[in-house]
Every structure is written in C-alpha cells, then in structure tokens.
Amino acid sequence: MSDVDGWEPEEAEKDLVIQVIRLVIESAARYGDIRLEGRTDEEIKNDIHEYIRARLAEPNTFASPVQYDYQSELINEAQRYEGNGDFNLALMFYATWFEHWLNGMIVAREPMVVLEREEIIRLIRETNLASKTGHIWHLLFGEKLPVDVVQTILKVAEARNAFVHYKWTPNLSEEEERAEKRELRNLAQRAAAAVTQLSAIEDKIVFAGSLDRLSRILYDMWPN
C-alpha cells in the first residue's frame, strides 16, 4: 500500500464508507438531529454536511446512536427460509424482526417524550409484546397500530415460541402435517404483509414520509 498522502481507496472501501455515511444520516434523521419535514432537498443536503462536520469535530455531542441495522438481514433470512418452505424458521426471523422494529421505534421516540433513556430501556426490557403493540404504542405515538397487524405480530411470536421451545404435537397424520404446513405458510405470508405495513408506518412517523426522498438525496450526494 502507498503512503497515506497518495492512498486511493479501493472501490469496495468506497462502497463501505458510503454505506456507513448513509447509516449515520438515517440514524440522525430517525432521532431528530436532521429534520426532513418542510425542508427542501438543498436545505437537507446542507444540514447533512453541517451534521457530518459537527460530528467529526465533536463526536460525543450528539445523542442519536448509530447502530448496525440487522433488520434487513432478518428479512432476507425470513424470505430465504420461506422460499425454501421452512416456515418455522421463517417465522422465527419474522418474529425477531417485529421485536427489533418495535424496540427501535420506542427508542427513536425518546426525544419526543418525557422519559429518560434508562426509562426507555427499562420499558423495552420489562414490557411484553402485547403491551408494546397495544397501550404502550398508543401512549407513545398517539394512535393505535392496525388491529390485523397486531394480531399477526402476536400470532407469529406465538408460533416462534412454540417452535423454539419444541412445543410440537407428536404423531401427526399426513393430512394433519399438510394442514399445519398450510397454516404456517399463510402465517408467513401475513408476516411479510405486516412488515410492509410497519415499514410504511415507520416512514410516516419517523421520516415524515420522506425516507425514499432521503435515500435519493444521499444517493445524489454519494452515488455508488
């Protein structure tokens, strides 16, 4: 490798840097450090540049955490197992995605509510899924999650727990096995539809309906 002054990053390294920058900016928008609503593309670009300059100068002055996004990988795995007809494993990954999504949404709500970070963490750790999708969600966001989505989340979690804890029914007939597989397939399809609905809700609440716009702006600033 040449000396630092003459060093040119490889394409793979450039791609990695771009991905990290995009992750940092999406996290900043998620936690309110960069505002999207009511801003033009140029204003958002200027805000992004200012945010990066400030973060490089004083990296500890920002409250918004930057975490690796496991959700895309969870969905990829769920879809892979679903495509292979292994619906129990698909549902395990869908259930994990739902939990990550709910916890992430609750954490992102911290700047807008009168709760300390420790209280948010305690809320995540000590509250069950039914409460997070029910009254806790309503209290934090002022609206309810769609009933069908909540039912799907809870049903998927129930199926995941039954699979993980080996709560299966022995000595099923072939007809019963086929019926069970159809039920699991239908549930996986419902889970995939719920992911789409929840992603749209996240875009509306967190990114003011501008997630695609932010992605386009970031691509304009740092194309692949």
Image (spheres, grey):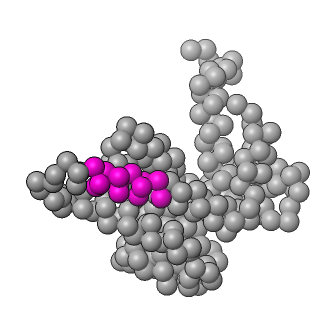
Q: Is residue 152 left or right of residue 139?
A: left
Question: Can residue 196 be seen from the camera position used here?
Answer: yes
| Residue 84 position within the rendered picture, expressed as x and y whole percent measured from the top left | 37, 37
Q: Is residue 189 left or right of residue 219?
A: left
Residue displayed at 42% across by 39% down? 83
Q: Is residue 101 left or right of residue 180?
A: right
Q: Is residue 203 above or below residue 124?
A: above
Residue displayed at 52% across by 61% down? 194
Q: Residue furthest left?
A: 171
Q: Main secondary structure of the magenta part?
A: helix
| Residue 70 position within the rendered picture, expressed as x and y whole percent measured from the top left | 47, 49
Quadrant hosting residue 170: bottom left
Tell me where the magenta segment starts and ends, as one range.
178-190
Number of marks present in the image shown: 0
| Residue 95 position within the rendered picture, expressed as x and y whole percent measured from the top left | 39, 59
Q: Is residue 200 above or below residue 75?
A: below
Question: Can residue 57 be seen from the camera position used here?
Answer: no
Quarter of the image that includes the N terminus? top right
Foreground pick, 93 / 107:
93
| Residue 180 position within the rendered picture, expressed as x and y whole percent measured from the top left | 28, 55
Q: Is residue 176 magenta?
A: no
Quadrant hosting residue 157: bottom left
Quarter of the image that includes the C terminus? top right
Q: Is residue 31 above or below residue 6?
A: below
Q: Residue furthest top?
A: 2
Foreground pick, 31 / 202:
202
Residue displayed at 61% across by 14% down? 2
Q: Is residue 12 left or right of residue 103?
A: right
